[in-house]
Image (tube, helix red, strand yellow):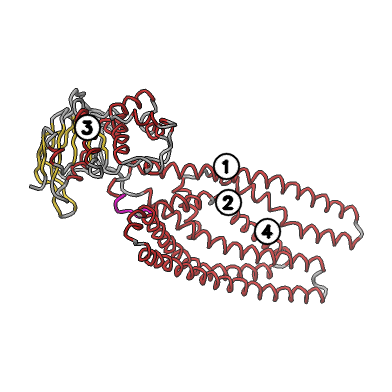
Amino acid sequence: MKNLQIIRRYFQVTKADRKISVFLVLSSIMANGPYLFVSLLFSMAIDSLSKGDANRVMLMMVIYFLLKICSKVFKIISLMVERRLYNDVYRKLQDQMVEKLDRIEMTTFAVCNKGELLNLVNGDVRVLAEFGTWLSEALLLLFSFAVSIVVLAKISLGLMAVGFLVNALVIWILNIYNEKYEKLTKEGKQKGDDETRFYGELLSGMREIKIFQMLAPLHTKYRRLNEAYIDVHNKQIRNRVISNILNPSITMCMEIVLMIYACWQCLHGVFGIDTVLIIQSYFGTMFTSLSDLVTALGELRIKHVSIDRYDGFMRKKEDEMTETEVVVESKDYDIQMDHLGFSYGEEPIFSDYSVRILPNTLTALSGPSGCGKSTFFHLLLRFEKPDSGTIRVGGNEIWCYPKETYAGLVTCVSQQPYLFHMSIYDNFALVNPDMDQIRKACRDAEIDDYIMSLPQGYETILKEGGSNLSGGQRQRIAIARALLKNAKVLLLDEITSALDEATAADVMRTVTKLAENHTILMISHKAVEQNLCGQVIRLGE
């Protein structure tokens, strides 16, 4: 019963096309089903040969070859249907996962296991995309089992009853082991997530690892994660070993007993040789189908874990921002916070806090660590929602703006801006593909001359994170990317903290010039930069 619930849940979660799935099952049965009747045909041919009925023998041979041709045709059809179903489900799930990223609360990414997300995309989605293939194979095994039962019932109801009871016993016993295997699979995937996450940390922190020679102790920690995974994997293998001993032991013993019984009946003239051949063939088919079906049901429990993981990701809490289309157009975009209240759990960050930042000005935000500077930005970016009070940009509450409109109005340049492993142009084209506007934004950010001096200009391929650029160049490209959105409000998060004094001064000169047409709020602890600002907001004082 639980197996049917898992199948039903798969279709509910993935929204896979049921019609294509049914067609795949039918074409798979038509491709493999004819072979189930080969033994019956040959038994009838042997009986006809013993009676000297050549015409009937020829008819059996013609039917046999027609079945083979039919099987091959439907095999090709089933492969094509399988490909379409796999591609449809794979594309749909991958699209849903990427689209979900935009709806998930930003705070989720700070606490989620990155290894789980990577394994979900690389592993679990593929497992779910293959579900249609599994379903067609499992139902084919069930069909084979049913055909064997029916054929045996024609010979002896007693034989059919014995076979049915034995199979029911085997499935009941092994279902217990499948329950345990599902739990071990879930635990194993969690251990694998931890491995992937930690290895990602090794790659991200390789610079510090080499500087401080930290690889040895980190390797020890990674090895412990390896051993934790291996321990669970060993338990899975032990579970499979036991189930693979029980299943063939019971079925093989019963097959031996039944064959002795069939031969005994043949020797006493009750069964003919052709009947013995049918019994041997279909009991073998029945037990083989049962064995493979039990294995398939074990695989279903693995797929159930993937269904749980995917469904869990899709159910992650989403942004609760309510947007309306009632927005009053404004020429100037100031920032106004009134009686703002916000806390993380029991720890208050802002309490009845009010401030106004004038339009087209450069304002510095400073204060000790943990005073709420990053939270200030998160609230403006709508990553967080205040407990009380209002935030207005351009005279409108920020949650009045539709998502796309607000994203084009307020943007942020981070301390470590991320650039993708693609050309400089392609990095900009993610925001706006218009080359003229890209060049203008780069000129305003004073990086256009440098890009044009490169041998391939804007087609220069950046390494991951833009590691083949200097810190100042990365910051200027990030500023240009922000300007490309034509945003009215720029949030700059310590953009000069990792730059040398001369480069930082050049970047600040560019920022000061941009303040003529933009409302700029920057987190900065440097007095020389604060002196360039018309207003300094000090938090935590």
Magenta stretch, residue numbers: 109-115
Query: Of marks 2 and 3, which one's residue comes earlier in the chain?
Result: 2
> Three-letter amino acid code at disc 1?
Arg
Q: Residue 369: percent from the left, percent from the top?
A: 16, 51
Of 465 and 447, which appears nearest the observer?
447
CA gap, disc 3 and disc 4? 78 Å
Give the amino acid at mark 3: Val
73 left or right of 243 in image? right
What residue is disc 4 on? 147
| Nearer to me, 226 or 181 | 226
In the shown orientation, is residue 337 left or right of residue 27?
left
Distance of label 2 from label 4 (alpha carbons) = 21 Å
Q: CA distance from mark 4 to mark 1?
A: 29 Å
- Pick whichever of labels 2 and 4 is earlier in the sequence: 2
The residue identified by callout 3 is 511
* Alpha carbon distance from label 1 to label 2: 11 Å
Residue 67 % position (x, y): 75, 50
The residue that mark 2 highlights is: 133
Does the residue at mark 2 contact the one at mark 4 (Cβ under 8 Å)? no
Residue at image location 60% in from the left, 55% down from the top: 139
Mark nearer the N terminus (3 vs 1): 1
Q: Which mark is first along the chain, 2 or 1?
A: 1
Residue nearest the viewer, comparing 196 with 223 = 223
Q: Residues within 10 Å of mark 3 (few under 14, many from 20)?
A: many
Q: Secondary structure at mark 3?
A: helix
* Closest to the observer, 386 or 149: 386
